[in-house]
Amino acid sequence: MMKAQSMGGSFTVLEGRKERAEAIRNRLLKAEAELSEREMRHHNALLEETVRQRTCELELANARLQESLKQLQATQAQLLFADRLATIGQLAAGLGHEINNPLAFIVGNLDYVQQQLIRTGGVPTPEEKQEMIEAIADARDGAERVSLIVRDLKVLSHPNDMERGPVDVVASLRSAVKVAAYELRDRASLVEELVAVPPVNGHKARLCQVFLNLLINAAHALPPGQAVRNEIRLSTRMDGPHHVAVEVSDTGCGIPPENLERIFNPFFTTKPVGVGTGLGLSVCHGIITALGGKISVRSEVGQGTTFTVSLPVYEASAEQDSSAQEELTSRAA
Ligand SMILES: Nc1ncnc2c1ncn2[C@@H]1O[C@H](COP(=O)(O)OP(=O)(O)OP(=O)(O)O)[C@@H](O)[C@H]1O
Ligand SMILES: [Mg+2]
């Protein structure tokens, strides 16, 4: 009985210890869990703080970038404006200069005629009359020069005012050669490599003007009196399936690299006053780009220069196609 009691007592003691141990373990586990949760919260807070800081830094960097971008855009706009102003200034100065020369010439000749008429009381001798007629003819030439400059400026400002149609570039080149013959005669032998090409989408008179400008430039790049030694070569070829290329090359003085970028600018010229206005190539560029083509140049000082004009092949529009189709159908009927 005693034994049983004492066994029962030790059983109870054991139970009690086990419970306490369990309770301690539970408390420990809870404490551990609380600790790791606190740590996690702490880490989370740290992480959030770091993210917040980084976001702030990124926002600052972004704002700085935006600011730099704005500054760059403003500077670019200023530069463009300054560049445009410079171009307008250059244009105005060149224009004033080019128009002033023939104007001074016109005024001089008209003054002369006026004075002669006053002096002779309107009854000049035959020689005086002849001199007055010549002075008036010279004044007229001067006025013609002004009107040519204005015409060229119109092409520059409204290059799109051109009716387009199929143009045979070989025929255009031949017409230009005829007009330039006098300038070419003494300076170069003309070599023609004119392969038949499909018509281009262009304007006959304007294309002729382009080729004439290029031919005259080529002639001016060659010294007179050495026609046997020098050559101006004209060629036509396909430039891919949809374009025709026309080349005008010469064995002349060439263009120094520092001038190559400027030759298409209005009024850029290396020629003396009265010989060149510097409008020729800018007019060519205006016409060719308005026709959807390209004009480019290759040059080597002392060796020569080649200008290449590339123009889109004329393709009958859908309207033309359908009217041609209608015509065929009505003929068949
Ligand atoms: N084939 C060429 N060889 C050498 N230099 C050339 C040639 N073509 C053009 N240039 C240079 O380019 C400049 C500009 O040519 P552009 O035809 O625009 O004007 P210009 O010939 O001087 O005058 P304009 O044609 O108005 O009478 C010329 O003054 C010349 O310096
Ligand atoms: Mg020229």
Image (cartoon, rainbow, N blue to C red):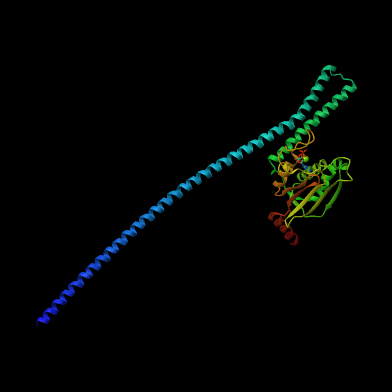
In this image, 129 relative to 246: left or right?
A: right
Quadrant of residue 327 within the rendered picture:
bottom right
In the rendered view, tell whether residue 66 sits above or below residue 316: above
Quadrant of residue 39 within the rendered picture:
bottom left
* Percent x, y of residue 300: 78, 46
Q: Quadrant of the C terminus?
A: bottom right
In this image, 189 relative to 259: left or right?
A: right
Can residue 304 be seen?
yes
* Percent x, y of residue 25: 25, 68
In the rendered view, tell whether residue 35 sits above or below residue 217: below
Q: Quadrant of the N terminus?
A: bottom left
**Ligand 2 in which quarter:** top right
Tally the numbered discs: 0
Q: Nearer the viewer, residue 167 or 42?
A: 42
Check the image and name the residue furthest to the bottom. Answer: 1
Can residue 172 be seen?
no
Residue depicted at 30% across the width and 61% down the height = 35
Quadrant of residue 267 within the rendered picture:
top right
Q: Nearer the viewer, residue 322 or 115?
A: 115
